[in-house]
Every structure is written in C-alpha cells, then in structure tokens.
Amino acid sequence: MSDAVPIIPPAPQPGQVLARGVCRFLSDALDFACLEEFVPERGKRVDVIAIGPKGEIWVVECKSSRADFMSDAKWDGYLDWCDRFFWAVDVDFPQALLPEGTGLIVADGYGAELLRDAPEVPLAAARRKVITRKFARDAARRLQGWRDPRTGFAVE
C-alpha cells in the first residue's frame, strides 16, 4: 500500500475556464488543435493559440472581467503571431470595450460561440514556419511531461 498523498490541482482561474470552453469549441466545431498558455516569444503569453486544418493560426485572449481587459497592455503584440485575433469573454462582459477589427467569442467552461469573425491578416511564410514548429514542439513536450514527469518538461 502506498503512503502517497493524491495531488489535487487548484481550481481553475476564470480566464482558464473561458479558455477551456474556447478550446472545446474550436476543436469540436472547427477542427482546430489548441494549446493554452502558449509563449510565442519571451515576454508574451497568449491564452489560446490554435492551428486549423489548413494551417491557419488563431490567437484567442480570454478576459474574465473589465479590470482584466483594462490591465492588458500587451495584446496588440500578439497580432504578429497569428492570422486572426479574437477576444473570448463571458456573456456578462461589456463587449463595447473590445476594439473593433478583432474577433469576438462568448464562452463559458463548457463551450463557446463565435459572435464576430476576426479579419484575416496572413502571416509571412517564415513566421508561420517558426510558430508552427514551436506549437508542435510545445505540444509534444507537454504530452511527454504528462506521461513521464521525470522528463523535466513542465505540464502547465
């Protein structure tokens, strides 16, 4: 018999709950592969990055409150790392705060709905190659870390 104490993960933060619903929607409805809390380059961390069946890259920033949105001064730096940029908010979020020219998804922990499509600004081929390769390597490392914690790859 083992004396190991089971590890109980902390309750997800509100933005993480939104991200889960967004990922379910993108995966189920649009056949995208998603990663949460992805770092495209040092100093930037997107809530959700998703790659579609044709290689299109979307970034979704999840905002759980007005204060959360107002404190985000880096979001426009994420535009350089995707073909389309979306906000994900809950049904009670004041949507008028969100900038024009960005997409809008309303989500909860179980799913989401696309309310406003984002304009497409295709990535340059070299940037697309870099981000796709990093997405693949990060996804593989997360899976490997989940399957074998001794690898040293953190599972976020």
Image (tube, rainbow, N blue to C red):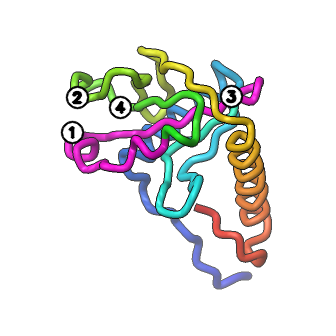
Instruction: Locate residue 38 relative to residue 124 in the image: left or right.
Output: left
Mark 2 or 4 closer to N-term?
4
Residue indicated by mark 3: 56
> Is disc 1 placed on a helix, strand or loop?
helix
Residue indicated by mark 1: 66
Q: Kindly identify which numbered label has been placed on residue 47.
A: none
Mark 4 or 1 closer to N-term?
1
Q: Say few, some or many: other residues with alpha carbon within 10 Å of mark 4 (under 14 / 14 to 19 / 20 or more).
A: many
Distance in Å between CA atoms under marks 2 and 3: 27 Å
**Which quadrant of the rendered structure holds the C terminus?**
bottom right
Residue indicated by mark 4: 89
Q: In the picture, residue 30 is in which quadrant? A: top right
Distance in Å between CA atoms under marks 4 and 3: 22 Å
The residue at 73%/66% (across/down) is: 145
Question: Residue 134: x and y, percent?
Answer: 72, 53
Mark 4 or 3 closer to N-term?
3
Residue indicated by mark 2: 97
**In this view of the protein, which residue sits in the foreground, 93 or 98?**
98
State which mark lies toward you, 4 or 3.
3
The residue at 70%/82% (across/down) is: 2
* Image height of 107 relative to 77, above or below: above
| Residues shaded magenta | 52-78
Q: Say few, some or many: other residues with alpha carbon within 10 Å of mark 2 (under 14 / 14 to 19 / 20 or more).
A: few
| Three-letter amino acid code of the residue under disc 1 | Arg
The residue at 67%/35% (across/down) is: 124
Distance in Å between CA atoms under marks 1 and 3: 29 Å
Question: Residue 65: x and y, percent?
Answer: 25, 40
